[in-house]
Image (cartoon, coloured by chain):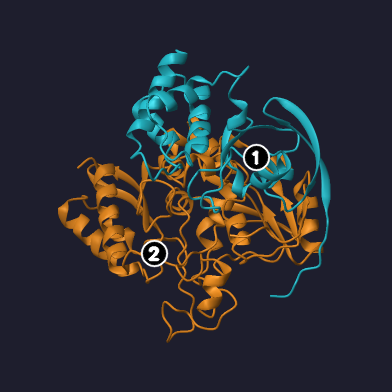
Chain colours: A orange, B cyan
Amino acid sequence: MSELAPLRVARPRDVEAAVALRRAENQSRYIAGGTDLIVNMRRGIRRPKLLIDLTGVEELGDVSVTQRGVRIGAAVTLAQLAAEPDVSTRYRAAAEAAEAIAGPGHRSVATVGGNLCLDTRCIYYNQSEWWRRANHYCLKHAGTVCHVAPQGKRCHAAYSGDLAPALMVLGAEIEIAGPDGHRRIPLADLYADNGRAHLKLMPGELLLCVHLPAAAPPSTYAKVRLRGAIDFPLAGVAVSLAMADGTVAALRVGLTGTNPRPFLLAETESFVGRPLDADALARLDKLVQKQVQPMRTTLASANYRRLAAAALARRLAARLAGI
Amino acid sequence: MAMQPLVLDKQLVRLKLNGRWREDAVADNQLLIDYLRDVARLTGTKAGCDGGECGACTVLVDSDPVLSCLTLAVRCADRSVETIEGLATHGRVSALQREFHEKLGTQCGYCTPGMIMAAEALLRRNPDPSEGEIRTALSGNLCRCTGYVKIIDSVQAAAGAVR
């Protein structure tokens, strides 16, 4: 780790000023908690000339409850989110994900927006400058070869944010501010299946807030990691399940840590109208194993992460179904 | 790597450090840990992993535990920063410091300032924590000597002493 290169810090008071600053300086980055960005800066991966500190922008910093649901500002901290009574009761997966991220010293400053926009990770990328240089860098940054899959031309770095799958199973939408005004999209549409460029944000765009619908089914989140704290997930799974008359009314499974983007499991509508019995759980297990694509981007093996993701999905679904 | 031109962008930062207001010209790229150790000369705060993974550099900012190796010093303007040096009053160690000593919560001592500050943040919020709550509050702090048992004993004893 090294000192940060010279830079300037600006602290705008509103979203318009933040977006204008970002547009005016090409080599600038938004910063809130900084627990992901500053690590990468100290490793020489990012070298912004201007940091735009969002913690002074009031409208990004609170959680508000309306009849149509809940609005969570992008600069709400993970500690704040986990402690929010409306979130921990009605949107359990989101609170469970938030309170299991990193450690208390991270959660006190790290934000919802920062976790959603977390950079993808890989053992060949999250290393010091000299380490990466000694390996001729990698496809994700400054190099030409992906050391995980040298034959291919894709970056396989894995997305490891915990909040995204939890918010996705709750039906989250996000609001984005940009040079041309605001847009609102489903959270899943923020992500592209590309470890090098996994965020579909235009230059200068800023994530403003997350909207959760008023009616959300029971949900839960869990992950597997090397240690019980600090570490990023090797696989993380969120499940939301609505039951009616003993059969599935709606089932959503969100996955993280295994692919370059967080995603909702496809084909879960095939469970609707049937009981969630042992057969269904075995089918869910297979479905997860088929759709996750862990690569050798962590010290744990890819196959272990595939099996862990499937086991978590099965376990969480069973728990929500009360079996 | 090309040399970057040296740009000295400094701001006058006023902050409360261990209860006393002070003002310093701080470069925008200075990290809080370097400000504390090199400018304020408070070397009790330790740099461990230097990348937000070990908790050794934990300090309090407005009573929240924060990793000083990932915090820009300029972002602490107008806020209250507390380090291990701020815990003793009139030459007397705090209950946490005393119990870390009495219960052998310290071995090599390198993680101790971070451990104590993380525990301090917990006890201010929750003066009577369960063992599980202590474990959660210290989950971001690594210790390679003690095996954690005596650290948890120390925090429990300190909570009892304050109560």
Return the mark for residue A136.
Answer: none
Indicate the amino acid at tag 2: Thr
- Chain containing mark 1: A
Q: Position of residue A229 (x, y in %)?
A: 40, 46
**Which residue lies under the disc numbered 2?**
A258
Return the mark for residue A61.
Answer: 1
- In which quadrant will I find the C terminus of chain A? top left
Image-based side of B141 in relation to A211, left or right: left
Task: Estimate how packed mark 2 is, as few (under 14), some (14 to 19) or many (20 or more) residues with alpha carbons within 10 Å.
Answer: many
* Disc nearer the start of the sequence (2/1): 1
Q: Position of residue B85 (x, y in %)?
A: 61, 30
Mark pair 2, 1: CA separation: 30 Å
Task: Estimate how packed mark 1 is, as few (under 14), some (14 to 19) or many (20 or more) residues with alpha carbons within 10 Å.
Answer: many
Residue A292 to residue B124: above or below: below
Q: Quadrant of residue B100?
A: top left
Determine the residue located farthest toward the bottom in the rendered image: A151
Image-based side of A6 in relation to B52, left or right: right
Q: Position of residue A71 (x, y in %)?
A: 58, 41
Image-based side of B77 in relation to A292, left or right: right
